[in-house]
Image (cartoon, rainbow, N blue to C red):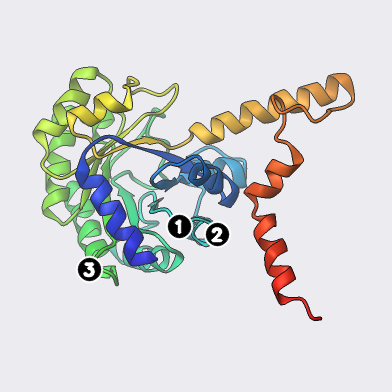
Amino acid sequence: MQTNTKQALRALVHARRGALVPGAFNALSARVIADLGFEAIYVTGAGVTNMHLGLPDQGFMGLAEIAEQTARIRDVVELPLIVDADTGFGNALNVRHTIRTLERAGADCVQLEDQVSPKRCGHFSGKGVIDTAEMVGKIKAAVDARQDSGLLIMARTDACSVYGFEAAIERAQAFAEAGADILFVEATETADQIRALPKRLVPPQLMNMVIGGKTPIFDADALGELGYGIVLYANAALQGALVGMQRALTVLRDTRRIDENPTLVAPFKERQRLVGKPLLDALEQRYSIG
């Protein structure tokens, strides 16, 4: 399955048709994404940090947390997985270990970024980036570390917010020359910048649509027409889940009960379907004695 998902992801990215990729923060959110027919999943570092640690995306997540969630997600879905590895959790040698760990966990693509540690959400203020040469070394280490040549390496730069758009272009070009398969220029702030990137950079690119962030929201079809391979909504599921929890728990607090209302809570049977109970029931019957 792993080789097939890697091949599928490579084909998806190179089609440059603006494939929508939502972010998952745990196994159940990944199952919902797969159930709705999306073609790939992004294992979001911000989402894992928010939902499992209850903290903002400011470098609190470690390799163990993202590897654990990646393995759990891989176990329940067969879609390609793009995994957010933040800064690689250290220097080039740490990146080597990160790539090997996440590849074993089931990643089909690993994303690395050029922020200083501790990193922060790309749409927060106060970011800093490491020297281009240091990031190039990390990308080369990532390329060398992969056991399967089909594993994709995505290089993200946050330089647009620090040194400007042209500096971000220069960095992305250097990252491509170092072996990055996919480029990700984070936190572009104008429509003109979004339109310019596919014309200025040769490798396939990801455009990050952060709801409420610094980047203007574009329709995915329009981004596909511009030539973007992936349109990422890393935390749409998380933000939707928060609203759903707040709505349901507000009703419970105020009325002292919740009935089975499909506009407010998922029906019991639907929850069991999404967690695979019918399959387990069938397997239990198959393996029962007598």
Q: Position of residue 262 (x, y in %)?
A: 71, 28
- Please give the name of the residue rendered at 33% of the width and 55% of the height, measured from the top-left corner: 109
Does 230 appear above or below 187?
below
Q: Quadrant of the N terminus?
A: bottom left
**Mark 1: secondary structure:** loop
Label 3–label 2 contact, CB within 8 A: no
Circle 1 is placed at which residue position?
78
Which label sits in the foreground, 1 or 2? Answer: 1
**Which residue is farthest front?**
290
Q: Position of residue 253 (x, y in %)?
A: 84, 24
User: Which label number is shown at residue 144?
Assistant: 3
Total marks shown come to: 3
**Mark 2: secondary structure:** helix
Dot placed on the residue nearer the N-terminal end, 1 or 2: 2
The amino acid type of the residue labelled 1 equals Glu
The amino acid type of the residue labelled 2 equals Arg
